[in-house]
Image (cartoon, rainbow, N blue to C red):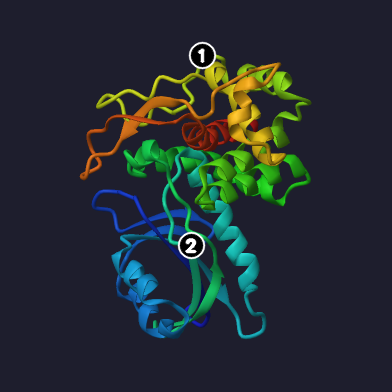
Amino acid sequence: MSDQCEIVWIVSPLRGVSLGDRSEVSFGNGFALMRTDERLLAARNDLGQCLSKVQLQEIGEARWFLALQIPQSPLQSVNVADCVEQLQDVLMAFQIVKPIETYGLVFHGVESPSGRMLWKGMGDRRWPMIAGQWAQLRAFDEPLLNEAQAILSKVQQTMKGADIGKRNAVHLLQLALEHPHPLIACLLAVTGMEAILKNNGRRKFEEKLCDLLGAMTSAFPDWNSPHFSPPNYRVKDLALHLHTLRSKVAHGIDLREAVNDKKSPVDLDELKPYILLDPNGYYPQTEMVQYATLLGEAAIYLLGQVLQRAL
């Protein structure tokens, strides 16, 4: 980068990233994961009037930031909105591999040739992305980062390409992660799968999802072995029920009526074994949860697996 250029920064604080002693991991083209330092924390002072007290505290607690740095010449300014979209595309490559939690904040600043940092404003403000209980048990570490880097160029090409179905699927994964209600998250995630599978009806959805991922594949990726195994739900166990739940929610039908469905009855209100995080988040115990809630989390992981295969 030229010493005579300003550097525009676009950054977003992240939760649940663990990269050992490394202070920065570059992906090329100006993208990097950066450990929090004084330049990044200065945003709390420069943007104090734009953020709530809670958000200011969260920025201080963030240990890693996803960052994009772009040289800006005096003759041509950087398009901040376009850069924010590029940063979101990189973030979604992470989320496809394993969801991590975000604060929903993206802000931008300018570093002068002398090295002085001035944070100018919010590039974007969204709902935080929420990783499910199973995803929270594994930090986003170096092996997962390597997986994300392996698909990064495919995600970036998809988001610039002409395949609307695949683009929509990535957007729907983002919206599903941002939505706090598991049933709406399920609706969004299953719709994302449908955008890729291009199925017509629940049976075709089940068939195509099983063909793509494998009927016996775990719906909950095996992120936490050898410490503990994933919940015992396979693609073929959940596929039909996911589509049923999506349809009931989309058409405003009482979920309790699914048990009387003539074609594929399912008790979405039934309690199913899942995991309960202990206070330290290390050793999960068995918990009984509503089946519809379990499906809402599984749908997000399944969409991630579909995208890994389809992009």
Find residue 2 and report its horizontal and vertical position in percent: 51, 75
Question: Quadrant of the image for the C terminus?
Answer: top right
> On the picture, is 195 further left or further right than 109?
right
Is disc 1 surrounded by few (<14), some (14 to 19) or many (20+) residues within 10 Å? few
Could you say whether the residue bearing mark 2 is in a helix, strand or loop?
loop
Is 9 placed above or below 175 here? Answer: below
Could you say whether the residue bearing mark 1 is in a helix, strand or loop?
loop
Q: Nearer the viewer, residue 251 or 141?
A: 251
Query: Label 1 is placed on what type of residue?
Result: Met
- Residue bearing the label numbered 2: 104
**Could you tell me which residue is drawn at 25 percent across and 27 percent down?**
227
**Could you tell me which residue is drawn at 65 percent across and 28 percent down?**
243
Q: Nearer the viewer, residue 245 or 45?
A: 245
**Could you tell me which residue is drawn at 45 percent across and 44 percent down?**
99
Q: Nearer the viewer, residue 81 or 127?
A: 127
Find residue 213 and report its horizontal and vertical position in percent: 58, 21
Query: Label 2 is placed on what type of residue?
Result: Gly
Q: Are marks 2 and 1 in contact (CB under 8 Å)?
A: no
Q: How many marks?
A: 2
State which quadrant residue 132 falls in.
top left
- Residue bearing the label numbered 1: 216
* Disc 2 to disc 1, C-alpha distance: 35 Å
> On the picture, is 173 further left or further right than 270?
right
Q: Is residue 311 visible?
A: no
Q: Is residue 106 visible?
A: yes
State which quadrant residue 154 falls in.
top right
